[in-house]
Image: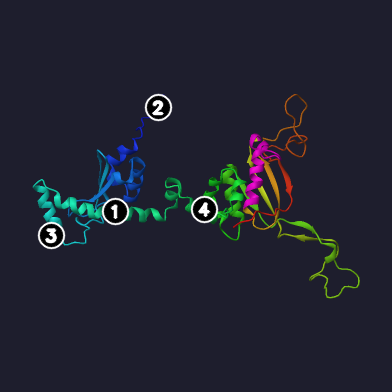
Amino acid sequence: MAAPARTAPAPLETELLQRGHEFSFAQAMRLLRLLAPAPSAIRVRPELSLAFPAADVAQIERQDDGYRVTTRFLGLYGSASPLPTFYTEELIDEAREDSSASRDLLDILSQRLFELATAGTAKYRLFFRTVEDESADDLERLFSLAGLGEAELRRSLPEPRRWLRYAGLLGHSPRSALGLQTIIADVLAVPAEVFPCRLRRVAIPPDQRLAVGMTGSTLGTDTVVGGELEDRSGMFLLRLGPLSREQFAAFLPGTPARRTLDLIVELYLDTPLAWDLELTLAPDEAPVASLGPLPGTRLGWNGWLGRPAEGAQASVTFPHHPSQGVTHC
């Protein structure tokens, strides 16, 4: 069967020259700065017209020494000019006589206005400043917003700039289960779900246990019998799945994906919490332990005696000790 007809993507310069009116002024200037040999090679002037402005950009032209952008705003003449209308009318009459001396003079004066407008639109667009302008100061501010302001901490991360994508989640306080599972699902590309307030039994330190001769304690209120108590405030369950066999094996202890997962949790937690990792296989994906030359299965990790019921999901849980978290700035 023949492939569907598709239009080949036009080069960026061709798009700008043929469809410049479809670009905003800020976007057009940004793209032209990538194409032009120098910022000074981009000249901007208003449109010589009193017609209603349909868009910010009227036309983009290629010149021998660069590009010329014709706009419909912020000029000293044209429909958006702050000067009286007769100035524009005189320039129109001058153009009919194939002269442009007065217009060229006003263009020299207004060029600086457009340069300031371009700088103003880019000032608060950190993506432009960090990626295209390579501003180290703005990059440092973004890392600080994400809690990664310490250079030593960034050196411990693979691809530190990748984590700027999650600055909104990493910089949010208090941390949430939804934020953690969102980052994990996006980084590892697997279904993830966090279940907070998981029940566990916690040992009571010996020096805080009730003993004969102690006073000021009320059984059932601030005192329990025994050396342990039930707690739901210090542990959560992280479930990944349903997973294929290959994905399941990738998250077993000691694998690169597992180390990345542990790093994400450690980076996100700002309080020491214990957590369990539950890996769930998709239905009918559970391998059966068998003898042979192929890499074997390990009971308790990726092997089961017998086969789960049809349609059932096999899973395994790995406990983790409380994380001490990472120092966030």
Left or right placement of residue 107 versus residue 236 in this view: left
Look at 53% across and 46% down and name the residue there.
Answer: 161
Distance (Cα) linking label 3 and label 1: 23 Å
| Circle 4: residue type | Glu
Q: Which mark is residue 114?
A: 1
Which label lies toward us, 2 or 1? Answer: 1
Q: Are marks 3 and 1 in contact (CB under 8 Å)?
A: no
Look at 26% across and 52% down and name the residue there.
Answer: 111
Mark 1 surroundings: few (<14), some (14-19) or many (≥20) residues within 10 A: many
Look at 91% across and 70% down and name the residue there.
Answer: 212
Which label lies toward us, 3 or 1? Answer: 1
Residue 131 to residue 14: above or below: below
Q: Which span is picked out in magenta?
A: 245-267
Choose top left, top right, bottom left or bottom right for residue 201: bottom right
Distance (Cα) linking label 4 and label 1: 29 Å
Left or right placement of residue 276 versus residue 217 in this view: left
Q: Are marks 4 and 1 in contact (CB under 8 Å)?
A: no
Q: Which mark is residue 86?
A: 3
Distance (Cα) linking label 4 and label 2: 48 Å
Residue at the bottom extreme of this rendering? 216
Q: Is residue 316 magenta?
A: no
| Circle 1: residue type | Phe
Dot 4 lies on which element?
A: helix
Distance (Cα) linking label 3 and label 4: 51 Å
Which label lies toward us, 4 or 2? Answer: 4
Q: Are marks 2 and 1 in contact (CB under 8 Å)?
A: no
